[in-house]
Amino acid sequence: MFTSGEPDGISNIRKNLFLINLCFNKPHTRGVFCYWDDVDLGMKKIEVVAGIITNDFNQILCTQRNVGPYSYISKKFEFPGGKIEDHESHENALEREILEELNLKVLIGKLFLMVEHQYPDFYLTMHAYKCNTTSYEIELNEHIDYKWMDIEDIQTLDWAAADIPIVDKLVLNEHG
């Protein structure tokens, strides 16, 4: 089930971390142990990239999702980005997605955080990268709103669940 070509000990550690992460992201198991039955390994898996885009004033671009098929992420705020196509690097996918969604050019920096989150209908792996832009001309092609916000204010928005660990780490780094 979890085969990776690694020695058994490493593979088991990865499996256990995977299960712990899934369990802590399920509301009914948060903070308690969970069983194999709590994890739906047959669930659809989606891998995406997201940009934590800052401007010259060190403000962060926060985009609001449109209404979609999943009510639990409709109209929630998120860091812009999207799915990684076959044979596409994270950086190329992020550059393409931000251009498609916002008509915005960015300079992509380092990986900030990788988030794994189980939503009710799919399992998401998100690679969030720090990005910079000097452009303020944004065209909303998929989102319904956007805000440039100071780091200390971003927690006031209603974020998609998978984006919350990124928000929390940004705020922690700002105050740490």
Image: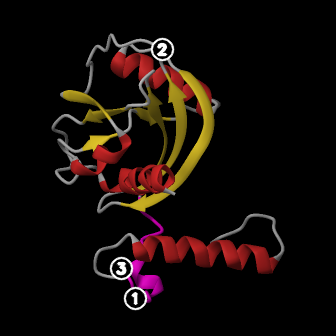
The picture quadrant where one finds residue 150 is top left
Residue drawn 60% across and 79% down? Answer: 16
Circle 3 residue: 30
Given the current orientation, which residue lies at the most extreme right position?
A: 7
Amino acid type at image mark 2: Lys
Callout 3 crowding tier (Cα within 10 Å): few <14, some 14–19, many ≥20: some
Amino acid type at image mark 3: Arg
Kind of element beneath mark 3: loop
Q: Which range is magenta?
A: 31-43
Q: Earlier in the sequence, mark 1 or mark 2?
A: 1
Give the percent coordinates (x, y) of residue 34. Answer: 43, 86
Give the percent coordinates (x, y) of residue 15. Answer: 62, 74
Kind of element beneath mark 2: loop
The alpha-carbon separation of the residues under discs 1 and 2 comes to 43 Å
Front position in the image: 173 or 124: 173
Kind of element beneath mark 1: loop
Circle 2 residue: 105
- Left or right placement of residue 62 versus residue 39 in this view: left
Give the percent coordinates (x, y) of residue 104. Answer: 41, 15
| Marks 1,2: beta carbons within 8 A | no
Examine the residues drawn in magenta and state their main secondary structure: loop
Callout 2 crowding tier (Cα within 10 Å): few <14, some 14–19, many ≥20: some
The alpha-carbon separation of the residues under discs 3 and 2 comes to 38 Å
Amino acid type at image mark 1: Val
The image's mark for residue 32 is 1
